Image: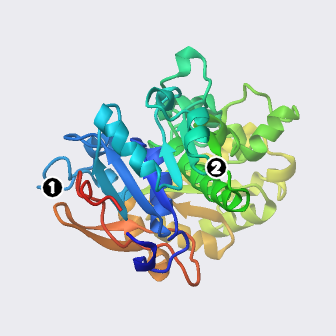
Amino acid sequence: MPLEQREASALGALTVLELAEGVGGEYCGKLLADFGATVIKLEKPGCGSPTRSLGPFAPGAPAPESSGLFAWLNTNKRSVALDVTSAAGAAALGALLQRADVVIDDHPAGWLSGVGLDPASIENSHPGLVLCSITAFGQSPPGERLHAEDLTVFHSSGWGYHTPSAADAGLPPLKGPGRFLPSYEAGLEAAMCVVAAVYERDVSGQGRFIDVSKQQVLASRIDYVLGQMVAGELPVGTGRTAFDLGGPAGIFPCRDGYAYIWMSAPAHWKALRELLGDPDWTASFPEHWLERECTPERVAQCRFHIAEWLRTQDKHEAAAAAQKLGLTLVAVNNAGDLVASPQYRFRGFFAEVRHPLAGAALHPTVPYRLSVTPAKLRTPAPLLGQHTQDPL
């Protein structure tokens, strides 16, 4: 689309080629597209991006247009069916590169070289192009780490033990929050790096190669736990619940789901006693036990009584009552809870997007607002090859 016809937006002047076929690269492209960039997604003819085959699926919608995951990751994009590994596809790709500012890829290390898009070649043929590559372990991983799923990345980054408080301490989850957490986090970092590189390109005239490692992205978020381990304050082999600072924090079953509680200060203990009606068992606990006398026996006893009480409560009612008293207790929300949340509704966080084949669905928007050029969901995810004849 010519620049003069584009709606005023933060990134409306950018043209992005998306070679990515995974969640990380597609999320990076989505963030840029939602801010107005023209993102041209190159897909394999016939089957399209692999994310088209990942659920959940819209009932009754035909393949390859039924994936809810693909629909969300690819709003505001244009789809061009193109086999970049063929001679004709390579020629078409070369023509698109002449008009592009950015290329996003998330194939394993080495794939870009195989299609003639290694950094050295791009620097010679397209010196102003920003090329961003998202991989599991960076551009030069050991051979056994060339191909890795997000589960592998999650645990190799340290997050498997950084994620505390399993509902059942004897059965910690294989994976923490979300099945694609490393990919989403890497996609966010990649989008930030792309914008920074484009800004620098506009000053220097030189494009840049961006190498994003999912593993390092997650490791950079380990925050205080990593610091404690490096400083020797927390044994490396400690159990996961130690990250709750020794207190009776954790996820507990409620009558209608789960709630999470965090306690680390006398004010929390005072609030808990009031919440539970100051039962007799609390009398044996010192006022400042969470700070000075937080023994395993007291933690176990406190957790037992918290669990007994929460089992009889509705999660949202318990959370509301606790928070009024200053106790850090929150409901563990499911998808239905999020859509019904008064706070999300007040912020307008969910917006309806109507797909021509999959129908209407609520999509999360973004957690930030620009006053004049906000991110918008303007068009649904494209049909496979919808813009092959008119990519721009």
Q: Classify the position of the N terminus by image quarter.
A: bottom left
Query: Looking at the image, is mark 2 or mark 1 nearer the viewer?
Result: 2
Residue 195 placement: quadrant: bottom right
The answer to whether any part of residue 169 appears in the image is: no
Instruction: Say which element carries label 1.
Output: loop
Instruction: Say which element carries label 2.
Output: loop
State the colouring used for the structure image: rainbow
Give the x, y percent position of residue 15.
Answer: 47, 60
Residue 307 lies left or right of residue 162; in this view the side is left
Residue 370 lies left or right of residue 343; in this view the side is right
Mark 1 Cα shell of 10 Å, populated few (<14), some (14-19), many (≥20):
few
The dot on residue 207 is 2
Residue 294 lies left or right of residue 347; in this view the side is right
Mark 2 Cα shell of 10 Å, populated few (<14), some (14-19), many (≥20):
many
Pick the front one: 185 or 112: 112
Pick the front one: 39 or 5: 5
Q: Amino acid at mark 2?
A: Gly
The answer to whether any part of residue 230 appears in the image is: yes
Lower sequence index among marks 2 and 1: 1
User: Which residue ends up furthest to the top in the rendered image?
Assistant: 143
Pick the front one: 381 or 185: 381
Pick the front one: 236 or 272: 236
Say above or below: 140 vs 160. Answer: above
Give the x, y percent position of residue 27.
Answer: 46, 52
The dot on residue 59 is 1
Q: What residue is shown at x 68% (from left), y 46% (from top)?
A: 221
Say above or below: 296 vs 323. Answer: above
The dot on residue 133 is none
Q: Amino acid at mark 1?
A: Pro
